[in-house]
Every structure is written in structure tokens, then in C-alpha cells.
């Protein structure tokens, strides 16, 4: 059979195109997300029922809640991927934002690009420690093992749960009014239902 002869089966071009498409889909599916590539997660993030912020490892940092006293954790335990890279916004993708850090003065997760207002530093900015956390956002549909309604507060720069509206917790940058949401809708993976 020559190249110009018709065949009874699939034409060669269609066969090659289908093979190339299958190879591309397979290769893309095998590429892990930045979080999966590193395999590093912290699985002990918790909700504070006083300020509505997200905190972890309160033994290793100062534990100062903007509602006064210390954070009071409750509810589910969340797992958040991170990278130890010191590159600004390392591992960021279209659906994962990096450069979130844990404040060493109040214990809350905050966005490092805008250090905001920290309850543990008397109104000064948050002080971040590595690693950089990567937060999923704007997934549609939201996977069943994720909780949505987590938002960035543009007054204090922390991540807070916005699912109890009109109550928006306690914000050190917006006293008496609570957190003020802007930007992405973040989703946290539930590690355990406690």
C-alpha cells in the first residue's frame, strides 16, 4: 500500500493525531500539582472559634487571638500543602496561590505580600516564618473533601472562614466590624472530621 492509497481501517493521519492526543493527555495527567510533587503537607491546621482565623502548632508560636487571650480551636483538621522554597510565590499555579505564611507572633495564616495587622504585635504587621503554604482557590466544582468559604481579609491579611455571615469573626485591622473579604474563594482539604 502506498501513502496515497485509501485503507479500510483508520487513516494514518487520524491514527497519529489520536496517538499524539492520548500521549498528551496521559503526560498531563501524570504531572503532579506543586503540592503533590513535594509531598509535603501540614495536617494540623484548625479553625479558631473566636476570631474565625486558621491556626496551627500553637505550642511553637505565640498564640494571640485578636478576640483577646489565646486562640480557641474547634472543628475539623485541615491539611495544607507547602513548599520550603524561598523563591517568591514558588509553586504557584492557576488554582493554587502560594506565599501564605504562619505568623510567628499570633499563630494565624496570613498572606505575605500584604503583611496586614497582627494581634500579637500590637497592631504592627505579621511576621512570617517559612514554609510557604499553597492554598487551592476557585475550583469548580469544589471536591467533596474540601471546605470552601475561606477568604482573604484585606484589613488584617489573614485567612478566615466567611461561612457564618453576617458574623465575620474578630479582625485586628477592623475592630468592631470583623474581617473584610476580597479576592479568591479558597478551599481547604479536610484531613480529619473531628
Image (cartoon, rainbow, N blue to C red):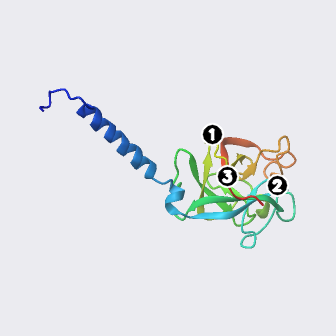
Residue 150 x %, y %: 71, 47
Which quarter of the figure has residue 77?
bottom right
What number of labels is visible?
3
For mark 1, give the secondary structure: loop
**In the image, is 21 to the left or to the right of 156?**
left
Q: Name the residue under label 3.
A: 188
At 51% from the left and 62% from the top, the residue drawn is 38
Characterize the local packing of mark 3: few (<14), some (14-19) or many (20 or more) Cα atoms within 10 angstroms.
Answer: many
Residue at image x 12%, y 31%? Answer: 2
Whichever of labels 1 and 2 marks the residue nearer the N terminus, that label is 2
| Element marked by disc 3 | strand
Q: Residue 26 carries which label?
A: none
> What residue is rendered at 61% in x and 39% in y?
140
Residue occupied by mark 1: 141
Vertical arrangement, residue 52 with respect to residue 130, above or below: above
Establish if 69 lies above or below 171. Answer: below
Circle 2 sits on which residue? Answer: 51
Q: Which of marks 2 and 3 is in front?
A: 3
- The foreground one among 128 and 165 is 165
Q: Is residue 23 above or below residue 55?
A: above
Amino acid at each position: 500500500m502506498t501513502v496515497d492509497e485509501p485503507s479500510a481501517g483508520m487513516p494514518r493521519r487520524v491514527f497519529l493525531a489520536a496517538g499524539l492526543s492520548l500521549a498528551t493527555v496521559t503526560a498531563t495527567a501524570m504531572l503532579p500539582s506543586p503540592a503533590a510533587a513535594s509531598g509535603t503537607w501540614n495536617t494540623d491546621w484548625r479553625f479558631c472559634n473566636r476570631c474565625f482565623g486558621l491556626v496551627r502548632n500553637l505550642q511553637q508560636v505565640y498564640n494571640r487571638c485578636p478576640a483577646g487571650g489565646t486562640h480557641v480551636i474547634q472543628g475539623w483538621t485541615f491539611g495544607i500543602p507547602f513548599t520550603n522554597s524561598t523563591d517568591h510565590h514558588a509553586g504557584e499555579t492557576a488554582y493554587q496561590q502560594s506565599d501564605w505564611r504562619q505568623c510567628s507572633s499570633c499563630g494565624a495564616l496570613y498572606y505575605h505580600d500584604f503583611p496586614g495587622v497582627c494581634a500579637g504585635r500590637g497592631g504592627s504587621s505579621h511576621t512570617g516564618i517559612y514554609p510557604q503554604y499553597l492554598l487551592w482557590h476557585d475550583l469548580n466544582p469544589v471536591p467533596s473533601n474540601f471546605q470552601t468559604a475561606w477568604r482573604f481579609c484585606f484589613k488584617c491579611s489573614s485567612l478566615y472562614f466567611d461561612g457564618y455571615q453576617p458574623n465575620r469573626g474578630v479582625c485586628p485591622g477592623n475592630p468592631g466590624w470583623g474581617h473584610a473579604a476580597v479576592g479568591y474563594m479558597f478551599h481547604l482539604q479536610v484531613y480529619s472530621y473531628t
